[in-house]
Amino acid sequence: MCGIGGYYRTGISTNTAPKWAKPAMRDLWDSLQARGSDASGIAYESPTGTRHFKRDIPAFELSPLATNMAFGMNRGPQWVMLHTRASTHGSAEENKNNHPLMGHNLALCHNGVVYNKDEVLKHYHTVAQREVDTEAILVALKKGGINAVSKLCKGSMSISWAKGQTMHLWTNGKSPLVIGELYNGDFMYASTDELLMTTNLKFKKVYDAKKGHLYKFTPTGLRVSKTYFKEQKVNMNFSWRNLSGFEPVSKQITYTKPTGRQEKLVVPKVNYIHKRKKLRHRDVCNPSQQYDSDVCNPSKKEMLDRVCDADYDWDSVYGDWRTWEKKSKQIKEWEDEQ
């Protein structure tokens, strides 16, 4: 995945960017490199319009020059957008594939993957100008706004775009996006809160951007509004904060028999739920011993001592380690049976 981040200076603060803004942006940009080092880019507001600078080099090589360009004027920029790219569609050597993408004085940065670019461009009768999949978002955004992006573009999207003195943030929840509010009224954002903390700034609050909500930053402050949003149906259920929550699905594969005839084979869903074995006295008895009353029918105290002290494979008794929390309940069931 790519990395996005940035800064917005509201009218609550002074007319120039604070002294800490420039080093904070450089630190954030260098940290974003952990999410992609194929290319890096920056866009910022200036008196002459929206400016941008991008190259197919890592952020730490570009950040010294680019941040000086953004904050080198007497008047600091109203907003700054940063991007580090991990290429998925389109070579980073072609600079037009790198972010920010520009169109009609609008700058766009995207973290995620859009897998129906051709379908979106066909809907608007537009010819592709770049290989990168983010072009579908740029076209839909210019033609129909954020609602068109939500309706037509399929995949994972956390995007930032800006024009004039206004900046927007939006996510469909499939890619991370975190917003931080500073004590002076300014705002910063990044892909994750860990990256936001690399600026060493104190935040009034930090929160995840809500999926389907539009965050609009203007000189007067932040305004949040709901947009058209319909949860996309996908074959896996996961959160970017817990990538281990993957639910396997059935697959259909084709194999060829020795006779040359092809047939379809359905591979069933993997079952991760282990059946727990009930703890009984026979589970801890030595198989070589005879089943006399003294060995296989011990007293309650002797049985509990064996359970606590015996050295044997706990997995063979309790199954998967995820079920160990049920151990006390199983022992209680055994006690009740006695």
Image: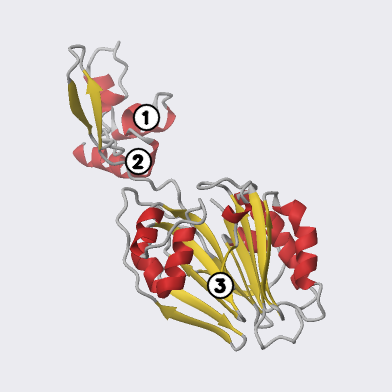
Q: Earlier in the sequence, mark 1 or mark 3?
A: 3
The alpha-carbon separation of the residues under discs 2 and 1 comes to 9 Å
Query: Where 323 sits versus 57, above or below?
Result: above
Q: Badge 2 is on which residue?
A: 323
Colour mode of the rendering: secondary structure
The alpha-carbon separation of the residues under discs 3 and 2 comes to 58 Å
Q: Badge 1 is on which residue?
A: 315
Query: Where 227 sits versus 42, above or below?
Result: below
Q: Amino acid at mark 2?
A: Thr
Q: Is the C-beta separation of discs 3 and 2 under 8 Å? A: no
Compared across the picture, whether 239 is left or right of 188 comes to left
Measuring from the top left, give residue 23's x and y in whole percent.
Answer: 78, 66
Callout 3: 10 Å neighbours few (<14), some, many (20+)? few
The alpha-carbon separation of the residues under discs 1 and 3 comes to 63 Å
Q: Badge 3 is on which residue?
A: 104
Measuring from the top left, give residue 101's x and y in whole percent.
Answer: 57, 62
Q: Nearer the viewer, residue 203 or 83?
A: 83
Q: Report helix, strand or loop for mark 3.
A: loop
Measuring from the top left, give residue 95's x and y in whole percent.
Answer: 63, 53
Compared across the picture, whether 156 is left or right of 292 comes to right
The image quadrant of residue 145 is bottom left
Looking at the rendered image, the quarter that the C terminus falls into is: top left
Query: Where 100 sits versus 322, above or below?
Result: below
Q: Earlier in the sequence, mark 2 or mark 1?
A: 1
Q: Residue at x 74, y 62 (%)?
A: 26
